Amino acid sequence: MSSDVLTAGRSAVLRGRQRYLPVLVTAGLLVAMFTVGGLRYEAFASGQIVLNVFIDNAFLLVLAVGMTFVILTGGIDLSVGAVVALSTMVTATLMTDHGWSPLATVPLVLLIGSALGLAMGCVIHYFDIQPFIVTLAGMFLARGLCYVIGTDSIPITEETYTAVAQTQISLPGEMHLSVGVVIALAVVLFAAYMLHYTRLGRNVYAIGGSEQSALLMGLPVARTKIAVYTISGFCSALGGVLFSLYTLSGYGLNALGMELDAIAAVVIGGTLLTGGSGYLLGTVLGVLVLGLIQTIISFEGTLSPWWTRIFIGLLLFVFILLQRLISVRRS
Amino acid sequence: MDDAPAPILRMRGICKEFPGVRALSDVDFRLLPGEVHALMGENGAGKSTLIKVLTGVHAVDGGEITLDGAPVSFSGPLAAQQAGISTVYQEVNLCPNLSVAENILIGREPRRLGRIRWKEVRRRAAGLLARLELDVDVSAPLSSCSLAVQQMVAIARAVDVSARVLILDEPTSSLDAGEVEQLFRVMRRLKAEGIAILFVSHFLDQIYEIADRMTILRDGRLVGEYLTSELGQVELVGKMIGKELKDLETLENAPKDIAAAERSRPFAEARSLGRPGSVEPFTLTIHEGEVVGLAGLLGSGRTEIARLLFGADHATTGELSVGGTPVTLRTPRAATNHGIAFCSENRRAEGLIPDLSVRENIILALQAARGWARPIPRRTQDELVDKYIDALKIRPADPDRPVKNLSGGNQQKVLLARWLIVEPKLLILDEPTRGIDVGAKAEIQRLVVELSDGGMAVLFISAELEEVLRLSHKVGVLRDRRLVAELPNDDHLTTGVLMETIASGGRS
Amino acid sequence: MNAAAVIRHRLFWPAAVLVLLLAANVFFTPGFLSVELKDGHLYGSLIDIARFGAPLILVATGMTLVIATGGIDLSVGSVVAISGALACLWITGLDDQQSTAGVLTAVGIALGLALFLGLCNGILVAGIGIQPIIATLILMVAGRGLAQLITDGQILTVNSAPYKLIGGGYWLTLPFGVLIVAAVLAITAFLTRRMALGLLLESVGGNATASRLAGIRSRGLIVTVYAFCALCAGIAGLMISSNVSSADGNNAGLWIELDAILAVVIGGTSLAGGRFSLGGTVLGALVIQTLTTTIYTIGIPPETTLLFKALVVVAVCLLQSPAFREKVLNRRRRRPQSAPASADPKVKVPA
Amino acid sequence: GCGSGGTTSASQPGSGGGDDKITMGFSQVGAESGWRTANTKSVQESAKTAGIELKFSDAQQKQENQIKAIRSFIQQKVDVIAFSPVVESGWDTVLKEAKNAKIPVILTDRAVDSADTSLYKTFLGSDFVEEGRKAGKWLVEEYKDSTETVNIVELQGTTGSAPANDRKAGFAEVIGADAKFKVIASQTGDFTRAKGKEVMEAFLKSNPDIDVLYAHNDDMGLGAIEAIEGAGKVPGKDIKIITVDAVKDGMQALADGKINYIVECSPLLGPQLMDLAKKVVAGEQVPTRVVTEETTFTQEQAKQALPTRQY
Ligand SMILES: Nc1ncnc2c1ncn2[C@@H]1O[C@H](COP(=O)(O)OP(=O)(O)OP(=O)(O)O)[C@@H](O)[C@H]1O
Ligand SMILES: Nc1ncnc2c1ncn2[C@@H]1O[C@H](COP(=O)(O)OP(=O)(O)OP(=O)(O)O)[C@@H](O)[C@H]1O
Ligand SMILES: [Mg+2]
Ligand SMILES: [Mg+2]
């Protein structure tokens, strides 16, 4: 049989670009949203507003990065908010009550977060229990540990830490950034590199596509799945450190429900909850969308609490709807 | 046989039990370097299970495995791969969300300082596919490729590993003659390099073409190990099914009244029906009681025609009339309402609901047609299900077993049964005998003839041209997603003529 | 032989944990299991568990069906708040709060709105194709605002005997809420198990593409299921608000979605969709409610309740996981020669 | 019933500073209770009467949202910022930013624990520990003649929240002086009626002998009353009840004799806040701590006060 009879090549040129379509649409809508805000509110259309969105959401960004890994494998991690709280709590107690130096505290906190993630990953993989329930237990555990440490909020007064927290990195045009943002962006870049240029990253996508196939293809499923939850645990702890830099305190009720924000950011960014499809850039955009909605809310300034909620819901709704409709229309 | 070289792989006294099923009992098996060894047996005989036990997908319950004389026990496919055993499992087990190139190379991508070199990945993948004479865009997602291409990708992945043992579990079930030939060429080359190949197929011709030796299983037990040259086809089948086979050949000569089929009322008429990028507009009439075969090469558009006729994809041009009235099929549901049924080639992605039982999978389409408020009474269910478990020899004959625990061939039978009980007016069968053993295949072919004699229109798609010829009243030939010829199946039509038509594109 | 079958039953381990929890309660409060007749109705801790568990069972029932189709509904908590708020608002506007007709209208309006909200969820998911978690997140956020808008941010107090009956009253000595739940469960079980609805739902959740090709109208089914889930949440909202004769837009049903999902998962239904078990869900909800009651009865300090909860949840899941039992519990008594060999393959692989 | 106020709908977006009208950014904790809503209303309404333009932002109980809101107030160059902190700690950074931008800050309702008191001008609000103490003092007074042990159950607010921590501490401090007072069960009721009822039901079953209930707010107390009645006991007689807040429903129950004592925690900070804001913006000196005028209510006082209660 001569090869000219074989036709199997499908026109995939278009398809390559289509894969990025949801992300492009999200980015476009984000810009549109910012423009509308600029037209509607005074003092809105400034660079610092954009930077503030980053400053105010650096921790969420880091959480969402970890969550992206987990969701890409088709899992979910509900413990992130509680781990943030636990991390702030441990940071604050160690530094304020026990006089530890940040150099010792921060690594320990990161270690605790990673260990918790590792443990959850092992339970999920080896005992074959649904991630939802394991990480929910992890959430109870971490939150519970916070209260065991203390129910009051603990201020952080350590000098170096305070200095780092209050450092403003100046940018041209009277604008400034916080240290947290720099760390968060570094994490994003590193994670994006991991996802696209390392075997671990590709295995994450493969498992999300089909865990069973990945196993039969001889990919290290166990290692990857556990790694993913460890990464998420690490990111939550780092998010906690950033949060404690942001608020300079530790408190057991911090970051209540932040896991939902992180999941929402990832999903708004176009990642499928069933796994295997999505980009980190999308996640960044998702975080910005949530942040910008929050900013618009505080600029609106006349909303009573319930109208705030309804308005957030409406903005989210319009955004998701447009995102979906435009993507469908285009493809 | 005793002067054979030392086996590279040896399994002794292997036992494997699943809840309620003894899949393997006390099976011995050996694989010599530089041979192609066929593993034979009916559907559910335990072939795939033996392979999975060997590669560590399932834990063994008893017995020992030695590789190069040393006992081994793999914790999973990864460990087996590292020990030099490369496997293509029965169902296509790839990641649909990744690109073709990645599917071939994931896990061993070329890297520099830990960074994947994507250009190199694509180049190597394209090279590997070229060795199988397959020309696809390697950066396209796998999900956009037809099942046959996916199968080839899986093979490309497996042969790329410089393994000592290559295991291929029914790699040819959805390939047509050209690809099979291509695969055999690669297999011969590997064999010459001293690689031991384990090969599973239900096509006896293929076995006799490529295999040196075979091991036969029946009901999870070893029947024996034979040299291919010393065992005739009839004997082989006899050993597989455990009794003499008499009526396998009878169908071949069943007389077909082509003219009568043409004279009956047309059931479905497609006029210039088409969908850009998938099939060019085609015109095709299927009469009541007529079997229309579709022939063509991999990706030639047979499946696309079937999907358009079933409303699984929307036709953008042309029109379709069913039973004389023009219709627009927006959903499969609309098609089933018109009495059209479609048995998809891809049973895993588009056919079965893995968690549901055999019974539920079988009655699903009928129940969907009746709506949720009119449940099929249990007694009727049992009658229908038992009838088809019996007729198609679905093993184990337990309607309450989850369908995911059935062997591949038996799953295919379940899918077929689902559509047979609906008693449609037009039955579209896309590769219905994929992975089905010789005995059951004859049974299915007989059923098709019976149904069409009873007035049902059938659109029959198969990569096996003999099968198409055996059943059809007329054959539509496709090439490059275009219906290029419509040939009546008279005495002059042979596989040779069909091949020629495909190659020439109908310009004779 | 029979005992082995019982142990192997899917729901054996959640049930065992439930029994264990009850036993712990009896240990701390000897009279825990006693049920007496007080003022013409049954009174006791077991009755309390059923009564307070009733809304959770309802919400979890709706959630089970949604999860069976492969979806999830985060908005149930908000629907709980909205329905309670609307009913109370209507009743406060009545001339005579004791009028049964007025209360029935209130109930009808509240449930109608819940149904409508559920339809919206369903349309977003099935019609527009938004991922369920995000589609329902919208209502989760906005819905609570809506509930507060209805109550004007206040706690609306009503004083209506007929309304009080729904969640706080008794009928034939039994808590009325429990009777409602029993009725809803019976209807659901009838529709899904006696009718073919269950099969179709499991099919859609198990493999959506295959279901479409089998001719199932999955869109309609999914919309219906979300509507049903919201209706269940609506009824639960009436019960919760009726139980305390007031509507609290902010706190009613807070976090109930998590508890409901947890109940479904403990009951053995997979979040990936497909096979579901109503009985399992009821059991799961009862485990959660008993756990809460246990925390109050045995006096676990509030600071450590979450640790305790984590402990129990982990215990339930571990016991329930065949892989865990295989790997840890069976390690000591190595499998005897003739025993049915390792039941579970390492991976679930078709064919 | 409850009058649905007309202050809720979204009106014109804020026009920033500009004219001589004072613009105030106010960041509220949330709307987690009726008390909080009354507080919000009071602020909104008195801003209108005082002619101050209010930028209101709801943090939904999240500190990070409050910080964001304060940042955006700074960005919008308001004249004065007021907020009710969700927690005590962690405000230094953002308050410094406000100070650098020369925007004065007023705390309401809850304090912050900054070492640097120059970060805010004044703190207007109640003292939760003192409220706990008031509750304890009444109890000690009530049982001064009794020698038997007094079995107390406590319904705490949301675990970890400042009012819950402080009301618990203040109460414990006072009754701790006498060994006859025993807290036999203490559990969180999350400040809600439903939880209050549920927890009380469990208490009643596991502790046959309860003399006193101390609830951290009226709502939990009201829920508990239903539980007590369901158990066939008489609230206010068989079990004495002390609560905090004095919202209308609570006062009604007090007047009806179902509650014995309520410690007021007034949400009506609006007028005082606007006064302070005007002074601060004008550069006048204000005291660093302004305690809201709060009282306590017995059943008799409740009957008199009830007709004029605003919330
Ligand atoms: N995971 C499983 N759980 C339970 N039973 C199983 C499982 N996998 C296979 N079986 C059973 O084991 C037996 C052997 O199946 P196997 O897949 O090995 O057959 P096969 O020879 O490969 O058949 P086919 O030609 O149809 O592919 C069958 O009866 C099947 O039902
Ligand atoms: N342009 C396309 N875009 C996306 N998917 C396509 C396209 N063309 C084909 N496919 C996919 O490939 C599958 C098979 O297509 P096709 O009909 O060409 O195969 P076939 O002729 O049946 O041959 P075989 O099944 O042997 O590959 C279809 O089910 C479809 O999903
Ligand atoms: Mg097989
Ligand atoms: Mg095909």
Image (tube, coloured by chain):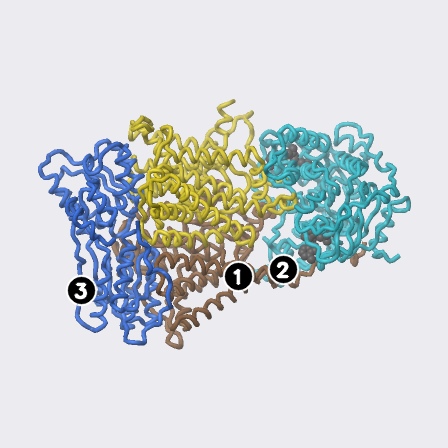
Of B94 and A311, the residue lying toward us: A311
Q: Are marks 1 and 3 in contact (CB under 8 Å)?
A: no
Residue under disc 1 on the same chain as residue under disc 3: no
> Closest to the observer: B358 or B246?
B358
Q: How many marks?
A: 3
The chain painted cyan is B
Left or right, residue D141 beside residue D165: left
Colour that chain C carries in the picture: yellow
The chain drawn in blue is D
Q: For mark 2, does the 10 Å Cα neighbourhood hold few (<14), some (14 to 19), or many (20 or more) residues? A: many
Check disc 1 and report the residue beneath it. Answer: A322
Q: Which chain is brown?
A: A
Residue at the front extreme, as displayed: C95
Number of other residues with Cα within 10 Å of mark 1, as a class: few under 14, some 14 to 19, many 20 or more = some
Give residue C178's position: percent from left, percent from top. Answer: 40, 34
Identified by mark 2, the residue type is Val
Look at the numbered discs 3 and 2 and tell me whether their residues touch, using CB distance below 8 Å.
no
Q: Nearer the viewer, mark 1 or mark 3?
A: 1
Judge whether D125 appears above or below B467 on screen.
Answer: below
Alpha-carbon distance for marks 3 and 2? 69 Å
Q: Is mark 2 within 8 Å of ligand 2?
A: no
Q: Are there few (<14), some (14-19), or many (20+) residues within 10 Å of tag 3?
A: some
Do the residues bearing badges 2 and 1 touch, measured as CB atoms within 8 Å?
Answer: no
Q: Which mark is residue B121?
A: 2
Residue type at mark 3 is: Thr
